[in-house]
Amino acid sequence: MSERKNDQHEMLTAEDLQDFGFTRSMAYAFLNRPDIPVIKIGRRKFIRREMFHRWLEQQEQKKDGDDLP
């Protein structure tokens, strides 16, 4: 794992996502999804921290709704 502090970065990289528990392949697959708002700079892809947390909240809400009849 990286020794960097995630709370200091405005934009997250695949390596930052690995610090959150994603495997390397999961992080790259996530950043290549068409529904994820990434920022491309050259060949690198980033996601804004705020957007990542918003996506996580949406996933939690979907999971909570799965239990409803």
Image (tube, rainbow, N blue to C red):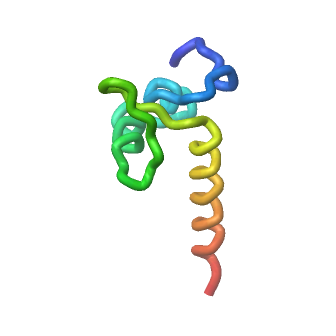
Q: Residue furthest left?
A: 43
Q: Determine which quarter of the picture holds residue 6.
A: top right
| Viewer-closest of 38 and 7 | 38
Q: Is residue 52 above or below residue 15?
A: below
* Picture coordinates of residue 33, whole percent (x, y): 36, 49
* Picture coordinates of residue 24, whole percent (x, y): 38, 31
Q: Residue at the spot x=58%, y=74% of the render?
A: 66
Q: Residue furthest right?
A: 7
Q: Relative to 13, is 32 on the left or the right? A: left
| Viewer-closest of 1 and 40 | 40
Q: Residue at the spot x=62%, y=23% of the render?
A: 9
Q: Residue at the spot x=61%, y=36% of the render?
A: 49
Q: Relative to 14, is 69 on the left or the right? A: right
Q: Residue at the spot x=41%, y=44% of the render?
A: 30
| Viewer-closest of 36 and 22 | 36
Q: Is residue 9 above or below residue 40?
A: above
Q: Relative to 12, is 64 on the left or the right? A: right
* Picture coordinates of residue 64, whole percent (x, y): 65, 68
Q: Is residue 56 above or below residue 15?
A: below
Q: Is residue 68 above or below residue 49?
A: below
- Name the quarter where the C terminus is drawn: bottom right
